[in-house]
Amino acid sequence: MSQPRPTPESDPAVPTPVTPASTYRLQLRREFPFAAAAAAVPYLASLGVSHLHLSPVLEAAPGSTHGYDVTDHSRVRAELGGEAGLRALATTARAHGLGLVLDIVPNHMAVPAPLRLNRPLWEVLREGPDSPYARWFDIDWEAGGGQVVLPLLGGPPESCGLRVEDGVLRHGEQEFPLRDGTAELPLPELLAAQWYRPAWWREGTRVLNYRRFFTISDLIGVRVEDPEVFTATHAKVLELVRDGVAQGLRIDHVDGLADPEEYLGRLRAAAGDGCWVVVEKILARDERLPSTWPVAGTTGYDALHRVDGVFADPDGSAELADLYREFTGLPAWPETAGAAAREVLTGDLAAELALLERWAGPEHAPAVRELLIAFPVYRAYPADPEPPPAAVERASRAAGPAAVAGVRELLLRDAAFAARFAQTSAALRAKSLEDRAFYRYAPLLSATEVGGEPGDPAVAAEEFHAYCALQARDWPGTGTVLSTHDTKRSADVRARISALSQAPEAMGSPAGADPHLAWTARQTALGLGRAPEAVPRLADALLKGAREAALRTSWTDPDEAYEAAVPGYAPTPLDLPAELAEAARANLLGMALLHLAMPGVPEVYQGAETEYRALVDPDNRRPAHFPREALARLDSGAAPHGPAEEKLALTAALLRLRRDRPELFRGYAPVAARGPAAGHLIAFTRAPDLLVAATRLSHRLAAAGGWRDTRLDLPPGTWTPLLPAPGGRGPGDGLRGSAGVAALLDERPVGVWLRR
């Protein structure tokens, strides 16, 4: 049983942070700068959100479409409008009652072209380990023979036309600094004399000697555990917080840091207790966020998994898994995940593994490898670096108890080794699961999101309720999400795909020489439906998925003939059968309702207040569509037309309620139905003056005869619907006592009531 986290109510010494009622994510880029965000503020205020969540705003690589490739922590990105544009956006938002939440990237910086855009890195490459900036980066100088290996060339150095020009070493658009006194040397001697070694990008997996973000060599890790580095990289962000420009911070990839808790403590002290802070932390299904972290919670992938899972049918999911393995001949989930972990560790992360093995010594090297592969969660932390017993047992069987015991002892006594082991473990989990195994194992694609469990996608109602009760108790200000810039499929695409778990026969027998790709293509097409430009968007997503899966082609070793055939697997737009379309509607509205009403701070991704069908990035980072006219029409009293407007009406109603009556969204109590279809209703109260109910597994429900005499015993009081009936009728006189669920949900699959 987890221990309750201290709260202002339980411990007066714990300060009360300023918690958003909700957030709305905006993806900033050159085509959608601060001025465009400011123009959207009146609409977003009318929608009911309380805070705008901005993608990273600090200076990034030129043309970056996401902003996570930071080049200068001291400046707001000029392409977005600079600091003046950001402050003007904050002023506009404040005038409409909105605050700002900034997405910050403490773990890494860009290795940009040209390199001089990252001045700290440029100085290290020019001056070597004696540079005052050398402390910024985790560089293993010994492994590189005294040089930083830069895998930035398109081929071997001798064939790349490297030349000295204008006092720098040039390669195409890239340029490298020259060590003082070396510019006149012949090229071979000049290269040997530098503090870096330009290398073919293919060498990166073997000889790289700096810590990076996952397996991306053009994102170099930053040592924010160093107080001077923390100060230098956070000064501008903290200035924006102190000046009231930003009221909250989202911390990107906290697991990449050497000591996340120490970092968060320093950030909390610098930002103040009133700043809302959440961390991008991927939790395993039975893992809890450390209670000692001074944050409001996570960015919400743990909530996404529970909301998705409660709308997945367990029997149908198992049947789909059987059909998929029979159709493709591919292994089950445990074997898929294990094989992907071993491939990524010994391939993509070979340089990181070599460092740890060298650190541990040859007698312990096999145990390092096996412990990393067996680790059941993303990483351990300095307060408890001991590997979990299950990982120790598995690794001992493969590498021997003595070798594993030696690595355990090293983890406990050497903090630097433990930190690098944990950072590598996090990168391994992310790359082997999210970016490989999740693309290889496709029985039910709606289950392959960050933090999900494709081998066991369904979440029982009891598990959902237990999770929500713990969140309400321990992390009431945590973030919750359904669609993000990182989701492989938006919530509405997943809602349609998840309906297949209630009717596995609808998958049919996809055609194609590659059964896995054919299965993936059909299921994704059913999820995307007749969205605009569905076929080319699907083709692009399939190609990316095939490269990530690395079964027949990959990013580093593309099979051109195979890739040329991939677009042919993108069928013409596919509609779900009519009965499953209704199940998809129930999923879409039910997922939105639970997300907006459950404990935590819900985030709406740009455009996802209405039906939003998107695939993996860059598809999900296309320009936002704001349904201004539809919202205005609904506000004028018009009835919603179709699932898209039903979702918009539901979203606006819940966001406005959260903004105007935050006291309603406290506590959590399940409300159980009784009768033959009780398992198809998920209902709970908040505060306890708010009651919500959603239909789950509606296709199975219809096949079993509907609600029949299933009833919901309402908590004491009179309950009035929040939403008017679809036909535009008013809320009526309210409900008391026991109500038949068929009558409660006669016109829409979800309901929201307030105690009068």
Image (tube, helix red, strand yellow):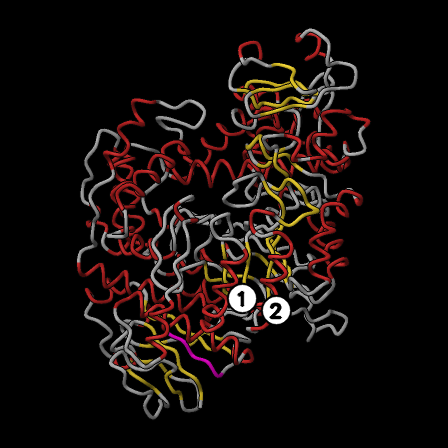
Q: Main secondary structure of the magenta part?
A: strand
Give the CA distance from mark 2 to mark 1: 8 Å
Q: Is residue 16 above or below residue 81?
A: below
Image quadrant in which you'd find residue 627: bottom left
Q: Residue 141 — which label?
A: none
Amino acid at the residue labelled 1: Val
Dot 2 alpha-carbon crowd within 10 angstroms: few under 14, some 14 to 19, many 20 or more: many
Observer-nearest of 629 and 214: 629
Task: Find residue 112 and report its horizontal and vertical position in percent.
Answer: 60, 33
> Which residue is found at the position 73% from the left and 54% from the top?
267
Q: CB under 8 Å between callouts 2 and 1?
A: yes
Q: Is 465 situated left or right of 730 in this image?
A: right
> Which residue is found at the position 42% from the left and 67% from the top?
594
Q: Is 662 situated left or right of 620 in this image?
A: right
Observer-nearest of 586 and 463: 586
Give the structural element (helix, strand or loop) at label 1. Answer: strand
Amino acid at the residue labelled 2: Thr
Say if the magenta span includes residue 351.
Answer: no
Q: Residue 601 — which label?
A: 1
Specify the quadrant that holds the N terminus.
bottom right
Task: Find residue 488 and report its horizontal and vertical position in percent.
Answer: 41, 46
> Which residue is found at the position 73% from the left and 14% from the top?
183
Q: Is residue 362 above or below residue 27?
A: above
Q: Which residues are magenta?
A: 689-693
Residue designated by label 2 = 19
Task: Find residue 293 and report its horizontal and vertical position in percent.
Answer: 68, 56
Task: Find residue 184 and report its horizontal and vertical position in percent.
Answer: 73, 10
Q: Is 33 situated left or right of 724 in this image?
A: right
